[in-house]
Image (spheres, rainbow, N blue to C red):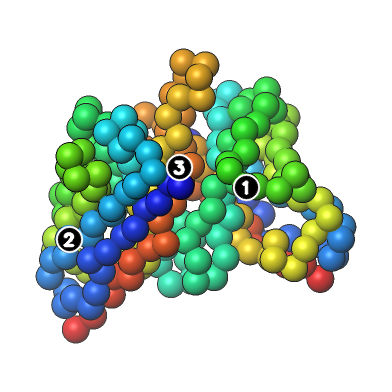
Amino acid sequence: QLVLTQSPSASASLGASVNLTCTLSSGHNTYAIAWHQKRPEKGPRYLMKVDSDGSHNKGDGIPERFSASSSGAERFLTISSLQSEDEADYYCQTWGTDLRLFGGGTKLTVL
Amino acid sequence: EVQLVESGGGLVKPGGSLRLSCAVSGFNFRTYSMTWVRQAPGKGLEWVSSIGSKNSFLLYADSVKGRFTISRDNAKSSLYLHLNNLRAEDTAVYYCGRDLGTDGSGFYYFLVDAWGQGTQVTVSS
């Protein structure tokens, strides 16, 4: 069964870097995913897609501070030089046969 | 500029119906598959339904199958979601999204790459 697992929360200091992880369920480590940012009272914002080889394509206007990579079944979102506006929920997304799927999301707190 | 604008949300009683609309601009709507996603209060994003560019597929989450119907009018660049037999647990902000499609490699990505701002649906007596 296709499942995306994310840690519920993460925190890092202003100006620091943070890695968020999205883990694909067993047998699905070749799947591409997308990362989305969700701030309160705002629509989601597409950040980038990440393939299993770590190649990624950002959405329009996404700062250089955002990058992504892959290792096995794990897909990573790295945010460097953290800013206060990066405090948000981050979701990964993938798809399977006849379904689309989101991870449970990670709430990022910028200290 | 790619834009997606949802409308049609509101307050409805349990068992009632609504039709959500998503008007798009800034891209060739008829060549993209589209998706509806919702977020209930205090919860994460939940996929609801997706439709192929030429209605080649109609997909639904188990939680809405048989109650919701997705459709599109390519001539009007509009996406719709018909919500029937609404329940309290359908209360959420509903977002429409464009699927990324192909990145030029020939591989098709069913990942949302553009979002609307959402429309609130509240189901309450």
The residue carrying pointer 2 sits among few (fewer than 14), some (14 to 19) or many (20 or more) residues within 10 Å by Cα, namely some
| Viewer-nearest residue: B33 or A63 | A63
Eyeballing the image, is B14 above or below A107?
A: below
Query: In the shown orientation, is residue A55 left or right of residue A31?
Result: right
Query: What amino acid is at disc 3?
Result: Val
Query: What amino acid is at disc 1?
Result: Gly
Query: In the shown orientation, is residue A82 left or right of residue B10?
Result: right
**Percent x, y of residue B52:** 27, 32
Q: Please state the chain letter of the residue tagged with numbered disc 1 in the rendered image.
A: A
For disc 3, the marked residue is B112
For disc 1, the marked residue is A61
**Percent x, y of residue B63:** 28, 53
The residue carrying pointer 3 sits among few (fewer than 14), some (14 to 19) or many (20 or more) residues within 10 Å by Cα, namely many
The residue positioned 73% from the left and 29% from the top of the image is: A71
**SS at badge 3:** strand
Query: In the shown orientation, is residue B91 left or right of residue A91?
Result: left
Please indicate, yes or no, whether residue B2 appears anywhere in the rendered image.
Answer: yes
Residue B19's mark? 2
Image quadrant in which you'd find residue B85: bottom left
